Every structure is written in structure tokens, then in C-alpha cells.
Amino acid sequence: MFALLGVAFVSGAFGAEGRAKVSLLLESSTYKPGASIRAAIRMKYDDGWHGYWVNPGEGGMRTEAVWKLPAGWQAGDLEFPAPRRFESGLLVSFGYEDEVVLPVTIRPPSGADGTAELAVKVTWLACNANSCETGTAELSANLRPGPADAGPDAVAVAKAHESLPSIDLGLKLDVAESTDAIRLLLSGATAASLSGAEILPITEQVLDTAKRIELRGDGSTARAIAARSPYASGPVRDLKILIFGGKLRKPVIAVWTASK
């Protein structure tokens, strides 16, 4: 199936395999050598089915993209917006239902010329309350060099990139652990907005997510206590968390690394 997107031809898999329809979105229908191209993978899940976040939780699998690009071209990792929580019995997972747009940035080399084919193989897992199915889609787009020319998906791609959570450089995360618990302390200008916000671990197998991890603030700091993940091995060396809710206008990311 081919759809005309400015001067870019995009082919995609739109079948029911894996309980999702998948498409490749491009902000521009052309490229400029050496300049980044904002793109995205759109996942539309069947009713009652959901896919997974970068940390899928228990029983899930994150959506992956493997690119085949012209020599010198590079694609970043898929990026993930804030997910929702799914509970099935004792299993807790994180992901998306209905539709999610996963941003990715592609960069041509400074010497790129001629028509370029961007090809990607997307793999995912979709689940409902009773079962799970894997899916695979192979997508491609042909771009030619030229001045920026917004395609029909430009607004959707821009919105997806701009709504991503970002690392808050003014927010300091400290971590202290005991035998069965991990204490999180957040301080900085944003801390006053964190009381009542929720934490999801981006780093896997560190925090136990069976119970929600909620922050309590006193104005200048915010704190939370989480159980250690049953899959944790050894002391915590690094931790990246997503923080959302509370008085935050958009989700933020905080990062901690143990002192050497």
C-alpha cells in the first residue's frame, strides 16, 4: 500500500497482525543534508488491547524499531511518552491503549544526496485481559533532498516530539537503600510541584511497582519510599525515573548515578 506524502512515498503494514495497525510518520517530505528529520511510529491498537512502554513492567515487551538506512544515515532510539498503568491479577505493566505516537529522530550525513530510502522493522507485543500476540511491520519511505516541506503528518509528529518528558536539570534526585526499601529524595526548583505526583521507574528491575509510588512534599523537597524490585541484583548503581501528575504541567525525568 502506498500513500503520496508530498514527494515522499511511504509504504506500511496496516493489517491486523499483532492487534495493531502501524504507520511511519514524517514531519517533512524532503531532507536537508546534515539536518535532523523528526519522524515517528504510530501504533493503533485494536479495542481492548494495549502495547508497552520503554519499561514494560511484568509480562510485557517494549516496542522496538530496527532501521535500514543509506550509508552514513543514523536513527535514534524510539522515544516513549508517559504511559498508563495496567493491572492483571498480581502483574503490573505500563503502556498504551487506543493510539500512541513514538517519536524518533533521523539524521542524514552532511554529504547525503539523491533519493534516500528509510526502512524500519517494528516489533511489538499487544495484550488484553486474556492473551497476548506479537506483531511485526515493515515500513519504508523515500525522501529526496530539498527545502523543508511539511507533509500531512507534520503536526502529529511535532506534537509527539514536543510532548515527550524531558530531563529536569534543576531537579536533584538522591537515592538511599536499605535491605528491603529504596528512599527517593527530590530537591530543586521543581520540587514544590511534586507533592502528589507519581513515579514510574524507567530503569528496570530496581523499584517494585506492585504498589503505586507517590511523592510527598514539604515545599522544598519531595520524598517517596519504594520496595526493592524482587528482580533486583546487588546495590542500586543508577536510576532514571519518570515523574507525572501533581502540579506538574508535563511529565519530567530525574536521573541518579551512584558515586564511584
Image (cartoon, rainbow, N blue to C red):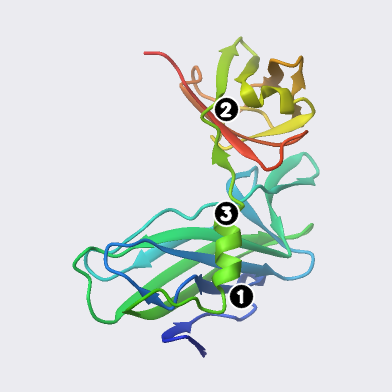
Q: The residue tagged with tag 3: helix, strand or loop?
A: helix
Between discs 1 and 3, the one toward the N terminus: 1
Total count of labels: 3
Give coordinates of residue 192: x percent, y percent. Answer: 72, 23
Q: Quadrant of the C terminus?
A: top left
Taking depth in this image into account, of 252 and 208 the one nearest to the observer is: 252
Residue at the spot 29% in from the left edge and 65% down from the top edge: 108
Q: CA distance from mark 1 to mark 3?
A: 30 Å
Q: Type of residue at label 3?
A: Glu
Give coordinates of residue 70: x percent, y percent. Answer: 26, 71
- Vertical position of residue 178 compared to residue 3: above or below: above
Q: The residue tagged with tag 2: helix, strand or loop?
A: loop
Q: Which residue is mark 1?
A: 17
Between discs 2 and 3, the one toward the N terminus: 3
Q: CA distance from mark 2 to mark 3?
A: 28 Å
Q: Which residue is mark 3?
A: 162
Give coordinates of residue 195: x percent, y percent. Answer: 77, 25
Q: Type of residue at label 1?
A: Glu
Residue at the spot 65% in from the left edge and 27% down from the top edge: 190
Q: Which residue is mark 2?
A: 206
Q: The residue tagged with tag 1: helix, strand or loop?
A: helix
Taking depth in this image into account, of 4 and 204 the one nearest to the observer is: 4
Labels 1, 3: front one = 3
Give the side of residue 226 with respect to residue 165, left or right. right
Q: Type of residue at label 2?
A: Val
Taking depth in this image into account, of 198 and 124 the one nearest to the observer is: 198
Residue reaching furthest to the left? 111
